[in-house]
Image (tube, rainbow, N blue to C red):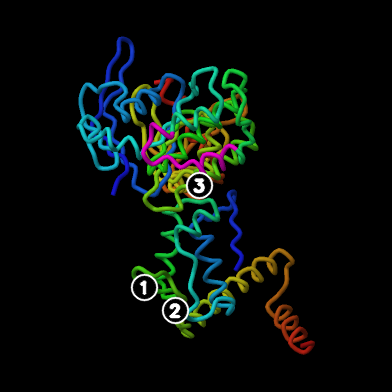
């Protein structure tokens, strides 16, 4: 698993870790029961603060992506399909918003966009 | 557990006063101590080691009061590097190793020689012929080789080139892979501290202005560049420091107190410290 952190990003470091681990779980790169690196090891390898790493893990656990076994470590939780569907819906919404924004700039009507959509669908 | 616990620590000299320092360094973490020359960093470090005695307050190091008798034993677990390394001039690293072997009960010869090799220090060259960088490296090698639990470093990376500094920061980073190991280091080079610290303590004019999680600081503060008119629209309590020039204003602000209308930019630790120190000076 790759974790790429940016210092100049708008998003805080813990959120960047959270998102990248979450994406790895959703995409199936990390599978149910896989052990995650320990908080301390990950922090030291990425050269970031232990507190920040802990915060990312805490949020992942809170949102049901991972679970902790005391004294052993953190593991990827069973995939919750509902949760993932929700996540995908959220992403689709984001993309639609972006389409809306761009369409406005190009002065495209609703019908134009629908037409584009059906053309692309046919191509596939 | 806290590696260092300081409560209401005060010490005064004619013309200088360190007042009411409260500071906690949780075990397993790295804390950076920043401040101007003469702000009280070295005094704080000396008070922690009880090299000078405090006027009031309390200092606990690795769970033991540093004026208690038991503190002598605790010193075995502390590695200290001061801003100038002093070893007798004619001694070579080999000699120094021998002396230390008889000084520290936990001395680890293999570890020491590994460090000498890693730092490319000649074993048989006299200390007086060492460059500043080599002297610092030797002091760090000694501090690391008696298996300390706590490292205290005063300006240990100043005077070293960026590559060696980075290498030394890596050593400190690896040192804290063990959650019982902690580091307290002071430095002028804020970018070094930004690289590895979990916590940042900022001492200014003998007072502790803040002691915070580093990433939290970087999240809370932001820089806004704007026109003077726009600056007037900013809530006063959000502004923590400003630079005004002919064409506009640059301000350090609390992100949470500023409306989204303003374009906040990512700030570095150095910016935060400069703005806070300068803002204080004008008042």
Report which quarter residue B266 is drawn in. top right
CA distance separating discs 1 and 2: 11 Å
Report which quarter residue B4 is drawn in. top left
Secondary structure at numbered mark 2 = loop
CA distance separating discs 3 and 1: 26 Å
From which residue to which does the magenta span run? Answer: B101-116
- Specify few, some or many for label 2: CA neighbours under 10 Å numbering under 14, 14-19, or 20 or more: many
Q: Position of residue B217 (x, y in %)?
A: 44, 44
Q: Chain of mark 2?
A: A
**Which residue position is annotated with label 1?**
A69
**Which residue position is annotated with label 2?**
A77
Asked if residue B103 is among those painted magenta in the image, a careful observer would answer yes
Q: Are marks 1 and 2 in contact (CB under 8 Å)?
A: no
Residue B87 horizontal side relative to residue B10, left or right: right
Secondary structure at numbered mark 1 = strand
Asked if residue B215 is among those painted magenta in the image, a careful observer would answer no
| Marker disc for residue B173 | 3
CA distance separating discs 3 and 2: 30 Å
Residue B269 horizontal side relative to residue B161, left or right: left
Number of callouts in the render?
A: 3
Q: Position of residue B158 (x, y in %)?
A: 55, 28
Residue B154 horizontal side relative to residue B131, left or right: left
Point out the residue furthest to the top here: B14
Q: Where is B7 relative to B217, above or below?
A: above
């Amino acid at each position: 698993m790759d974790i790429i952190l940016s210092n100049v990003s708008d998003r805080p470091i813990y959120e960047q870790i959270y998102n990248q681990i979450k994406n790895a779980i959703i995409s199936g790169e990390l599978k149910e029961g896989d052990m995650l690196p320990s908080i301390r090891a990950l922090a030291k390898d990425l050269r970031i603060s232990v507190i920040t790493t802990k915060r990312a893990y805490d949020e992942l656990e809170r949102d049901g992506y991972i679970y902790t076994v005391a004294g052993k470590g953190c593991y990827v939780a069973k995939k919750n399909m509902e949760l993932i569907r929700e996540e995908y819906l959220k992403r689709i919404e984001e993309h639609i918003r972006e389409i809306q924004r761009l369409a406005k700039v190009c002065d495209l009507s609703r019908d134009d966009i629908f037409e584009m959509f059906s053309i692309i669908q046919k191509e596939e | 557990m806290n590696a260092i616990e300081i409560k209401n620590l005060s010490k005064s000299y004619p013309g200088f006063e360190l007042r009411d320092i409260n500071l906690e360094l949780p075990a397993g973490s790295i804390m950076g101590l920043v401040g101007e020359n003469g702000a009280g960093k070295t005094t704080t470090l000396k008070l922690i080691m009880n090299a000078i005695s405090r006027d009031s307050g309390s200092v606990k190091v690795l769970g033991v009061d540093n004026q208690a008798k038991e503190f002598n034993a605790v010193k075995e677990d502390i590695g200290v590097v001061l801003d100038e390394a002093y070893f007798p001039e004619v001694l070579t690293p080999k000699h120094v190793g021998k002396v230390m072997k008889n000084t520290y009960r936990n001395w680890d010869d293999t570890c020491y020689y590994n460090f000498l090799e890693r730092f490319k220090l000649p074993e048989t060259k006299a200390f007086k012929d060492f460059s500043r960088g080599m002297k610092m490296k030797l002091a760090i090698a000694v501090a690391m080789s008696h298996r300390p639990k706590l490292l205290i470093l005063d300006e240990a990376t100043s005077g070293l080139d960026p590559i060696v500094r980075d290498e030394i920061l890596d050593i400190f980073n690896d040192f804290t892979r063990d959650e019982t190991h902690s580091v307290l280091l002071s430095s002028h080079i804020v970018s070094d501290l930004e690289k590895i610290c979990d916590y940042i303590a900022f001492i200014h004019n003998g007072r502790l202005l803040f002691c915070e999680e580093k990433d939290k600081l970087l999240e809370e503060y932001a820089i806004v560049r704007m026109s003077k008119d726009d600056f007037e629209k900013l809530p006063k309590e959000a502004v923590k420091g400003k630079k005004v020039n002919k064409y506009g204003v640059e301000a350090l602000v609390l992100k949470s107190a500023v409306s989204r209308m303003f374009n906040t930019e990512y700030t570095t630790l150095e910016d935060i410290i400069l703005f806070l120190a300068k803002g204080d000076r004008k008042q």
